[in-house]
Image: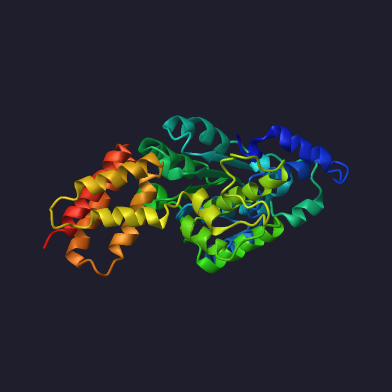
Amino acid sequence: MAATFFNNKARAAAVAAGGSKQKPTDGKEEQTQYQPWVEKYRPKTLGDVAAQDHTTKVLQRTLQASNLPHMLFYGPPGTGKTSTILALAKSLFGPALYRSRILELNASDERGIGIVREKVKGFARTQLSQPTGVSKEYFEQYPCPPFKIIILDEADSMTQDAQSALRRTMEQYSRITRFCLVCNYVTRIIEPLASRCSKFRFKSLDNTAASDRLEHIAKLENLNLEDGVISKLIDCSEGDLRRAITYMQSAGRLVNAGSLGGKKDGDEDAEMTDAGSRQVTVRMIEEIAGVIPEDVLDRLVQAMQPTKFGSSYEAVAKVVTDVVADGWSATQLLLQLYRRVVYNDAIPDNQKNKIVMVFSEMDKRLSDGADEHLSILDVAVKISGILGES
């Protein structure tokens, strides 16, 4: 039996039952209602950007001067890089001129030299025309400087040839076009390109800033959160606010599923959803984030312990087979196992050094597409051998 979240008949019945109580809404309200929360609560102004005070202060000054340099935003994912440049662009040009003055491209999709020669260069050399149908009050509210902005998101995915071709374009059309490169890894941007930009580093959100933002969204969405849910969201997302908001929305949809027709016997989601309390619990967040239960890790760590009879391969292989059969992610398992082993004070430092190298090699292999079952088994057996060394 499918979960009620996907039960269209139940959803239709719930809507029909509450139809007389609903207020008429316009298209914009409905569109906002069904938006992902990441987009719904994306910062609209520079003042809304969380925990990037230094960057926003500098950009506020450039906003007042209406004179931007080429910019390079870099930092971990989910820290507000794209949101910041979009908020800056909207503050500069307003809704009327935004579409004609801003070109936003995701370089991870269009990463070759062709995109630079065609789309980027074509937009960069387009001359600015006098805007029509815009009042004087509009220009008093928005600076509307005499240049366009090209936003290249995920710029670190661009090929070397594409980045090299971009250098000349940035110089040639700098009078009427500014570039903003957004990336996670600044080392993947070639030095001649990076040197043409003002660099802005976006740091991972601290727990206080992330907690405040998540609590604000939960309040606006009328979510009932169990104690510890916010902390668990921050822990699972590792400083990525976008991921934390996505997890919270998934949990919110899960508890709201109870109002769309009720649970049926045998429903697979029944044990996760407490329809009576309609409260988001820590366990829900762990399930959504794919966190492996502590008892599963305990079994694996116990199986890896050296024995008097030598090899612990059989015990390790049995636990690993069960873990893979349950569908747990190998990457998540390695992350949690790393924390469990490396932060264990009972393990000598020389053994930890060898274990860290094992994790490093396996992380590379998984990134290259290695088999997860064999990878987990290899790591566990190697760690068991290292722990057995005298």
- Of the 4 image quadrants, the one containing the C terminus is bottom left
- Of the 4 image quadrants, the one containing the N terminus is top right
Residue 192, percent from left and from top? 37, 48
Question: Where 323 sits versus 347, above or below?
Answer: above
* Residue depicted at x 45% and y 44%: 155
* Residue depicted at x 25% and y 50%: 380
According to the image, what is the colour scheme of the structure? rainbow
Residue 187 left/right relative to 217: left
Residue 311 left/right relative to 149: left
Q: Which residue lies furthest to the right in this view?
A: 20
Task: Find residue 10 and report its image quarter.
Answer: top right
* Residue depicted at x 44% and y 52%: 291
Front residue of this view, candidates 125 and 338: 338
Q: Residue furthest left?
A: 390
Whether residue 81 is visible here, answered yes or no, is no
How many marks overall? 0
Residue 21, percent from left and from top? 87, 46
Front residue of this view, candidates 154 and 148: 154
Residue 292 left/right relative to 93: left
Q: Residue furthest front?
A: 265
Question: Where 89 sits versus 235, above or below?
Answer: above
Front residue of this view, candidates 262 and 85: 262
Task: Find residue 384 and report its image quarter.
Answer: bottom left
Residue 211, percent from left and from top? 57, 65
Residue 75, percent from left and from top? 45, 55
Task: Find residue 57 and report its image quarter.
Answer: bottom right
Residue 155 left/right relative to 312: right
Front residue of this view, candidates 297 and 101: 297
Whether residue 300 is visible here, answered yes or no, is yes
